[in-house]
Image (cartoon, rainbow, N blue to C red):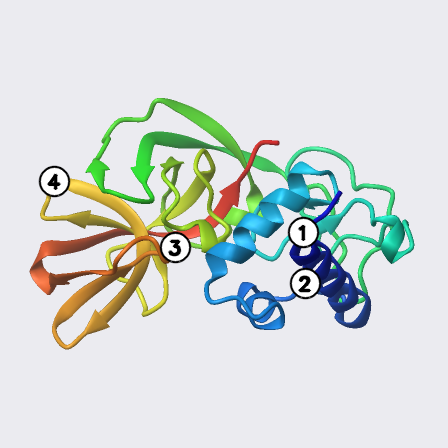
Amino acid sequence: MLTRKQLDLLNYINKCVQRDGVPPSFDEMKDALNLRSKSGIHRLITALEERGFIRRLAHRARALEIIKLPEAMGGTATHGFEVRVIDGDMPDVPPPANALPVSNVDAFDVPVMGRIAAGVPIEAIQHATHSVAVPGAMIAGPGEHYALEVKGDSMIDAGINDGDVVVIREASTADNGDIVVALVEDQEVTLKRFFRRSGAIALEAANPAYETRILPDNKVKVQGRLVGLIRTY
């Protein structure tokens, strides 16, 4: 049994994917349901996922798939919004209107350098603990790559959950809006959106429960940019 809000959200998502071939953004879903924050949308999506109506896929916040629809909506499932395969075959479902073909890709081992906080910063871990297989397309750009396990929920509205593995390209600079690995005061690392503001650095969470941290420019060092995400179901 779905609540009215859950049913309204599922109906809105279904209409968007049938019309556009892509899912609505969190902001679009929030506005459509007249909610005050995106955290409410996350809770509704989690509830729909737990009840088996939708499935969140890896790599992007918008990557969702409708598994089934309730009888009130016809009781048939529509196709997924986007399918990205890390290891396995393509599901036997028709692609969305704007989807690009997905084929199996070569995988490369990337060292996992420990955990990074998406929440209260934790101490940086400097040594690889194990490795993870990453699709070649995800690390096609220049520079060295490494992976980190996410701890915390401050980036949840960007589609990054506690326990996800983020793939990072080493970098010492970032553009406004990039999700970065930031070293704070040479002691702590955190995963946040990066912004320059009047000589200071803003590290912004993607969860309204966390405040944006404003720090002097010389207290923050960018250590890498987010290029991909791996989630295990």
Residue at 33%, 31% in the rendered image = 113
10 Å crowding of disc 2: few (<14), some (14-19), many (20+):
many
> Which is nearer the eye, 199 or 47?
47
Residue 157 shows in the view: yes
How far is disc 3 from disc 2 in space, using C-alphas? 20 Å
Mark 2 in CB contact with mark 1 (< 8 angstroms): yes
Residue wearing tag 2 = 23
Marking on residue 187: 4
**Is residue 59 left or right of 10 when viewed as pictured?**
left
Residue wearing tag 1 = 64
How far is disc 3 from disc 1 in space, using C-alphas? 19 Å
Mark 4 in CB contact with mark 2 (< 8 angstroms): no
How far is disc 2 from disc 1 in space, using C-alphas? 7 Å
Residue at 82%, 46% in the rendered image = 68
- The type of residue carrying mark 1 is Leu
For the view shown, which residue lies furthest in the bottom direction?
198
Residue at 34%, 22% in the rendered image = 129
SS for callout 1: strand
SS for callout 3: loop
